[in-house]
Amino acid sequence: MQILPDSNFRLVILLAAICALLPLTSRAEPAEANSAAASIVVHKSPFCLCCKEWIKHLEQNAFSVTSENTLDTAKIKQAKGVPASLQGCHTGVSQGQYVFEGHVPARLIRKFLANPPKNSIGLAVPGMPQGSPGMYRGKKFEPYNVFLILTGGDYRLYETVNQPEDQ
């Protein structure tokens, strides 16, 4: 066994200590932020099949999903400020404040969460359009609109989806 000279030994120890600390300082915050951003609680009817398909779509797109069954989804929608004209089948809530109403594609949820527009509370796909995640069965696709929900009940077009999302 070879013994390192004092100066080299100190250098190796210093480098090992720096390398050990790097993951703690450079990676911890983004990992925590990504974890929080990728979590959604879905409020849904226990009898709805399309809700289960939308949850599967989210999970396949790296979201951590918890579902809460309720027979009164209207109460959740009202409490979260979803206008009646934008209501869909289920309500997803991320970070305790952002709402994703109906069959919103995971891609657009990520886009929204990365940079939430000022005075917005979430996104909505009203109704149950053919072709939206959870409603698309690979046969008939119809383009549909995703709306940005603003505080106070206003809304505006966020994006028109013209082709099926990855299911």
Image (cartoon, rainbow, N blue to C red):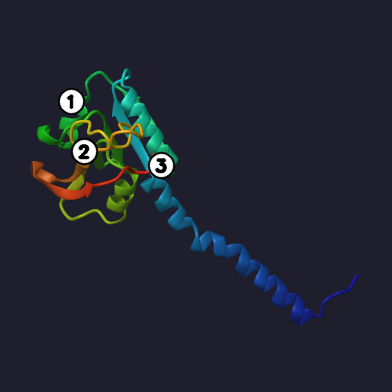
Label drawn at residue 63: 3
Label drawn at residue 125: 2
Q: Which amino acid lies under the numbered mark 1 shown in the image of this protein?
A: Ala
Residue lying at 53% horizontally and 59% vertically, measured from the top left:
24
Seen in the picture, residue 26 relative to 11 is either above or below; the reply is above
For the residue pair 167 and 15, the one nearer the viewer reads as 167
Mark 2 surroundings: few (<14), some (14-19) or many (≥20) residues within 10 A: many
Residue 5 percent across, percent down from the top left: 81, 80
Q: Whole-Å distance between the Cαs marked 1 and 2? A: 16 Å
Label drawn at residue 74: 1
Q: Quadrant of the C terminus?
A: top left
Residue 115 percent across, percent down from the top left: 27, 56
Sequence-earlier tag: 1 or 2: 1
Q: In which quarter of the image is the N terminus?
A: bottom right
Sequence-earlier tag: 1 or 3: 3
Seen in the picture, residue 58 relative to 43 is either above or below; the reply is below
- Residue 74, located in which quarter of the rendered image? top left
For the residue pair 163 and 108, the one nearer the viewer reads as 163
